[in-house]
Image: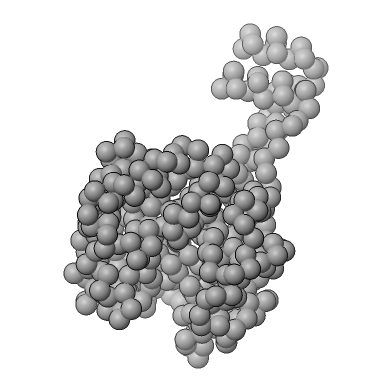
Amino acid sequence: MAMLSSTSRTSGSLLSRTPVMLLLILYIASLGITDAQVGVCYGKLGNNLPPASEVIALYKQSNIKRMRIYDPNQAVLQALRGSNIELILGVPNSDLQSLTNPSIANSWVQKNVRGFWSSVRLRYIAVGNEISPVNGGTAWLAQFVLPAMRNIHDALRAAGLQDQIKVSTAIDMTLIGNSYPPSAGAFRDDVRSYLDPIIGFLSSIRSPLLANIYPYFTYAGNPRDISLPYALFTSTSVVVWDGQRGYENLFDATLDALYSALERAGGGSLEVVVSESGWPSAGAFAATFDNGRTYLSNLIQHVKGGTPKRPGRVIETYLFAMFDENQKQPEVEKHFGLFFPDKQPKYNLNFGAEKNWDVSAESNATILFLKRDI
């Protein structure tokens, strides 16, 4: 404790304040960690959206630290340089077939990953979005997903980036055949031959599965049996009991059904990243400003605490979407934005305050002391 007496000469009151300062520093640090778990998807299907440079500035101004984009848009990637925003980079469904060629996959990684590493903080590459072997619109693409994932992973490995950037794909919840109760969650029998090899591959490379989870659509499709408070996180008591686990909201029940389905498919070790979740403000049943604000603000807080099946785990989550996109269909899809195209916020959402280390000289002395003493 010799350091204690010499350091304390900076102020007679420093010692008495040290425990308080330590708690304050740890608290502020913990806020930064949890807030950073929530990102926002940056869709571009609008003809009135601001340029990429202004969008990146809006992310930073709003303290949104993570982003998902759906294709390697060069203007967006350039604007992200030096921003410190972590990124899910999407491989468009239209590129999947070509990426079954290892040479093309290597070129894709060279151009869109190596060309921006490490000034852009790439976190995941999402190879395809919501592909389903039983969906008429995407069924023909299902055969290309796993080969494309393997080739992108091999190209990352050749570049020495396989530990820094994880490869995955984003599924939607229509691949779940049974979701009630959550512990009985199981994938549809007719998608197992598609999903099981993907799950096995993700397990082998220790990558999470990406999943787009929308309680809005579940509720809107069955408002007779699902209550609005259950969908909006506003229920004040357990709505669904599943053995010893009680569910107060539909988001947890849906995610736990997915965890159960993964366990039945041999993927019990996989983490799940919620790569999309949101609530529209107009355009369809229950799509209102108040519901959108309630769902999003509650979701931001809720994902810090895990689910009944996997409690205490922060759920990495990406809100959909940054802007209302006027070129999407059907009408309800145009109204998921957190911001209007003129960059004005639709809701007053709190993504957390930036950490401010511009503290007094006395506090700086305490911080330096604590670093040495610890």
Image quadrant in which you'd find residue 361:
top right
Looking at the image, residue 117 lies above or below residue 348: above
Colour mapping used in the image:
one colour
Tell me where residue 25 appears, x and y as whole percent.
65, 35
Tell me where residue 228 appears, x and y as whole percent.
57, 81
| Quarter occupied by the C terminus | top right
Residue for point 65% across, 19% down: 369
Looking at the image, residue 280 lies above or below residue 202: below
Tell me where residue 140 appears, x and y as whole percent.
25, 74
Residue for point 51% across, 72% down: 249
Q: Is residue 84 left or right of residue 201?
A: right
Residue for point 51% across, 83% down: 330
Residue located farthest toward the right when viewing the structure as drawn: 12
Q: How many marks?
A: 0
Residue for point 56% across, 39% down: 82
Tell me where residue 296 appears, x and y as whole percent.
60, 67
